[in-house]
């Protein structure tokens, strides 16, 4: 399994460091001065061991790349250069973007990521308008086995399986199964 995540290395007193910039820190729950780091971990679920296998410094002023650009580059590097065997990609809601999910799809991998409750989806096959995830109704069967939905902005025939996993009140988790 591969895990993509990011963190901010706190440098609130280091104004002279070029890559230090104001950015949101999930640990601090606010904007701080720091250096952004996007990392890729390999997790062996059987041995419960993990390794950092790639990372990128987030420096949009220096290289013009977004965090999504870095994740996509690391993903391609894993497959094309390192040829690391994996089937599943876990990532935060920040990376739940159509282009990245499509790239993972193209590799025939399974991805798992939370979607924010305000994300617009359709579970009616186009009969009704898109609605927020938190406005979906769930049958007992869907609660147990997931719900097939289309995310707004995804290709017309692209469906993903959504699971209602309540960890916090502002996210619902999506698991794409290669169907």
Image (cartoon, rainbow, N blue to C red):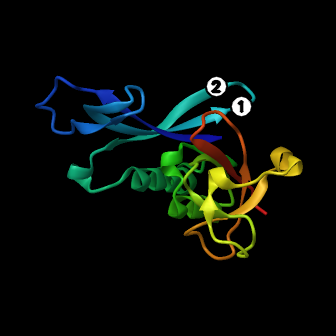
* 64 sits left or right of 148 in the view: left
Seen in the picture, residue 178 relative to 74 is either above or below; the reply is below
Give neighbour class at mark 2: few <14, some 14-19, many 20+ (Cα, 10 Å): few
Residue closest to the far right: 141
SS assignment at label 2 = strand
Would you place residue 128 above or below residue 109 in this image?
A: below
Q: Position of residue 128 (x, y in %)?
A: 69, 72
Q: Which mark is residue 64?
A: none
Q: Which quadrant is the N terminus positioned in?
A: top right
What number is the disc on residue 45?
1
Depth check, front residue: 53 or 57: 57
Q: Position of residue 132 (x, y in %)?
A: 60, 57
* Residue located beneath label 2 in the image: 49
Which x, y percent locates residue 154?
Answer: 59, 69
Residue occupying the point 42% across, 32% down = 26
Q: Looking at the image, which residue is at 59% across and 51% down?
A: 83
| Res 89 seen here | no
- Asked whether, in this view, residue 29 is left or right of residue 42, the answer is left
| Screen quadrant of the C terminus | bottom right
Does residue 2 lie above or below 150 as drawn?
above
């Amino acid at each position: 399994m591969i895990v993509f995540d990011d963190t901010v290395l706190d440098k609130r007193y280091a104004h002279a460091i070029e890559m230090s910039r104001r950015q949101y820190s999930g640990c601090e729950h606010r904007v701080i001065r720091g250096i952004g780091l996007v990392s890729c971990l390999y997790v062996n679920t059987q041995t419960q061991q993990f390794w950092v296998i790639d990372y990128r410094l987030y420096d949009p002023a220096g290289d013009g790349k977004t965090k999504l650009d870095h994740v996509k580059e690391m993903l391609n590097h894993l497959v094309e250069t390192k040829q690391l065997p994996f089937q599943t990609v876990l990532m935060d809601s920040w990376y739940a973007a159509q282009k990245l999910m499509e790239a993972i799809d193209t590799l025939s991998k399974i991805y798992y990521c939370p979607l924010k409750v305000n994300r617009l989806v359709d579970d009616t096959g186009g009969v009704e308008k898109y609605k927020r995830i938190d406005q979906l109704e769930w049958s007992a069967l869907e609660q147990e086995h997931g719900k097939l939905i289309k995310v707004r902005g995804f290709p017309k025939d692209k469906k993903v399986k959504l699971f209602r996993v309540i960890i916090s009140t502002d996210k619902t988790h999506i698991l794409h199964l290669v169907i």
